[in-house]
Image (cartoon, rainbow, N blue to C red):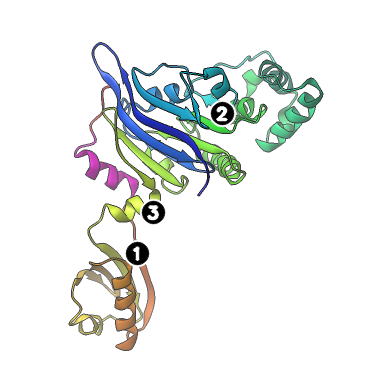
Amino acid sequence: MGSTVVKTRRLTKRYPAVTAVDSVDLAVESGEILGLVGPNGAGKTTLLRMLSTLLPPSDGVVEILGVDIRRDPLEVKRHVGYLPDFFNLYGDLKLWEMLHFFAEVYGVPSDMVERRVAEVLDYVDLAYKRDDYAKNLSRGMTQRLGLATLLVRDSEMLLLDEPASGLDPVARIGLRNVLKRLAGEGKTIIISSHILTELDDFCTHVAFMDHGALKAHDKISEIQRGKCEEILVSLRVLDGGDSVPGALDGMDGVSIVSKNDGLFKIAVNGGLPEVAKLNKALVAAGVDVVELREERAGLEDIFMDLTGDGKEGAA
């Protein structure tokens, strides 16, 4: 387990007519890619803005790398990079000029600026565009350039608000690969989205928000397994599977949900040890097993289960 980068306790943001973030307790470790997911208006952007020190909390505590954001916001800003959903870049600057500007604003030593700019452009695969003007970039390239403005000063934590919004599949994959590489190098990333399928196979952890409240937070694998009272197993056999029901006789908590031409869906109570027993019983009965795997619930299914109806929140 890495060191704790983000820790909040009862973090709350109130407005006169609504509570946008409601008593959120959250801990994020170094190297995590946390998907902050929920419908539009769930409070995701408000939470990110508080973590970035751009928005003061109404109540609660936020610590970034052990520093209380209220006591020393400038120290927090040195370590955190925030990229909003919609951001303005200086379109009449060339890419290298843009990054030079951000490097100087963020206090990168003058003798390191040129090298940092070259490294970052290469990192986000925009080195071949270094002499192009920012206004001529595609949406996907603009998102990568926005990310580069954070990397040029080597931010330890990245807060990204809907970074994949409006990207085509190729651009989304490119952005995903860059973020995975950053996490592998120890960067901590919190990325928000209201499109759950964008994050399903990308984040290491997930936090569900609805109506300003945090509904669940854990590793994706754990939250997928934990929301199911039973494990659903997909079983494929060579023949028609006539011998499968007999192989399961006497096994408590195991039932066939469906069968279709050698493909079975089997519900197993009792966790993975019972799945292992199921596999042994099939082999002992002489069933020719081609595939046996656990089926995981998708993030959309889990979110609907947690919130009831998935209706939009209030902030």
The picture quadrant where one finds residue 143 is top right
Q: Tell me, yes or no, whether the highlighted magenta stretch contains residue 210.
A: no
Q: Nearer the viewer, mark 2 or mark 1?
A: 1
What residue sits right under mark 2 in the picture?
143
Q: Give, as a three-letter code, the residue at label 3.
A: Ser
Give the Cα distance between marks 3 and 1: 11 Å
Q: CA distance from mark 2 to mark 1?
A: 36 Å
Residue assigned mark 1: 294
What residue is rendered at 42% in x and 27% in y? 62
Q: Residues within 10 Å of mark 1 (few under 14, many from 20)?
A: some
Q: Is residue 277 visible?
A: yes
Magenta stretch, residue numbers: 298-310
Most prominent secondary structure in the magenta stretch?
Answer: helix
- Residue 52: give x, y in percent of width and height: 49, 23
Is residue 302 within the magenta segment? yes
Q: Secondary structure at mark 1?
A: strand
Q: Rounded to the nearest whole Å, what is the CA distance between mark 3 and mark 2?
A: 29 Å
In the image, residue 174 sits, relative to residue 136, either above or below, namely below
Please report whichever mark, 3 or 2, sits nearer to the chain's N-terminal start. 2
Circle nearer the viewer, 3 or 2:
3
Closer to the camera in the image, 137 or 215: 215
Q: Secondary structure at mark 3?
A: helix
Query: Secondary structure beneath disc 2?
Result: helix
The residue where tag 3 is placed is 221
